[in-house]
Amino acid sequence: MAGPSPYLEMWRAAPRSTFESFRDQSIELLDAVLRSFAEASRHVLEENGDMPLEMALGEELPAKLRNQLATWAEFWKETPIHRFLPGTKPILISEKMRSRYDSCCFHEVAFNFALGLRIAVRESDLCSAYCSHVIEFTDNDGLVSDYLQSCIAEIRCECAAGIAKWQAETAKLAPNSALAVQQSANEKNKSKIFPKGIPDDTDIVDLAIRIDSARGSDAKYLDIARELTGEKLGDEPRAKKLLARLRMMRRRGQANF
């Protein structure tokens, strides 16, 4: 008899971290689409748009994408995360791409974009055809990159809203539970760190909490930020950006750490 899903076990042990892992999975899917579209567009601009997409991307990305889609689907199927993510208005997309469901969330948009990419590779679509389909989908007349980046921002906001909804529901169902007490303590700590209001960006909040928790240790701020973002030493643009934002907030009196 099969045991519980590892994703469900992850949810039971750390719901917030599971939310954030799912958010990161969705962003990685869109990042793969961004890179693939850029590569296909390059071939089109070089008048080589009749090259099959699979040949243009090589073998590594499609294989990685297949695994990422499977992981995303397990998160969606085995955890209750989808119940807490807000739905948005439907977007009509081209016949070649998978349709978006009514009232689905931006995490699903990422999945649908990535699934469309996988289908295009599997069916040996040409670079020119794939670019046309994606442009038609986004209805942005070539500003695909801007649209996908905006979707990434929406995913981050959506995740923060989902976490807030989960916390509210949990506190309502069990106001006297140990979890509710812990959440209350966490919120008090956040309010202490952010005296002028807790930011919506969960990454900024998490980084500030980690730095505050490491107070008195020899840990360097950049090392803590890199651990949060999962970046490698010497290649940490996101960690540096988060740290710069947090330091600016401290200078403005918006953060104490």
Image (cartoon, grey):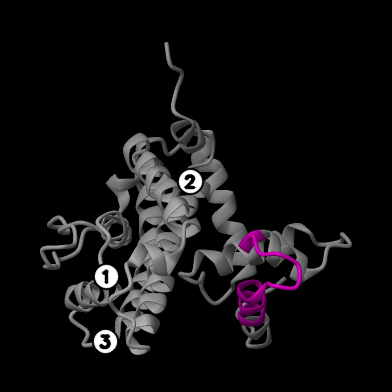
Q: Which is more toward the observer, 106 or 53?
A: 53
Q: Which is more toward the observer, 11 or 125?
A: 125
Residue 236 located within the stretch drawn in magenta: yes
Residue named by callout 1: 126
Residue named by callout 2: 18
Residue 36 located within the stretch drawn in magenta: no
Q: Which of marks 3 and 2 is in front?
A: 3
Q: Quadrant of residue 214?
A: bottom right
Choose the circle earlier in sequence order: 2 or 1: 2
SS at mark 3?
Answer: loop
Residue 231: x percent and y percent? 66, 64
Rounded to the nearest angstrom, the CA distance separating label 3 from label 1 is 17 Å
The amino acid pointed to by label 2 is Thr
The amino acid pointed to by label 3 is Gly
Q: Which is more toward the observer, 41 or 14?
A: 41
- Picture mark count: 3
Q: Residue 142 carries which label?
A: 3
Question: Horizontally, is 214 left or right of 38 in the view?
Answer: right
For the stretch drawn in magenta, what is the main secondary structure? Answer: helix
Residue 242: x percent and y percent? 61, 75
Give the quadrant of the C terminus.
Answer: bottom right
Residue 225: x percent and y percent? 69, 66
The amino acid pointed to by label 1 is Leu
**Residue 118 visible in the displayed image:** yes
Rounded to the nearest angstrom, the CA distance separating label 3 from label 2 is 34 Å
Characterize the local packing of mark 2: few (<14), some (14-19) or many (20 or more) Cα atoms within 10 angstroms.
many
Residue at 47% x, 57% y: name it: 59
Question: Horizontally, is 160 left or right of 128 in the view?
Answer: right
Residue at 17% x, 59% y: name it: 100
- The reply to whether discs 3 and 1 touch (Cβ–Cβ < 8 Å) is no
Query: From what the image shows, is residue 85 above or below residue 223?
Result: above
Region in magenta = 228-246
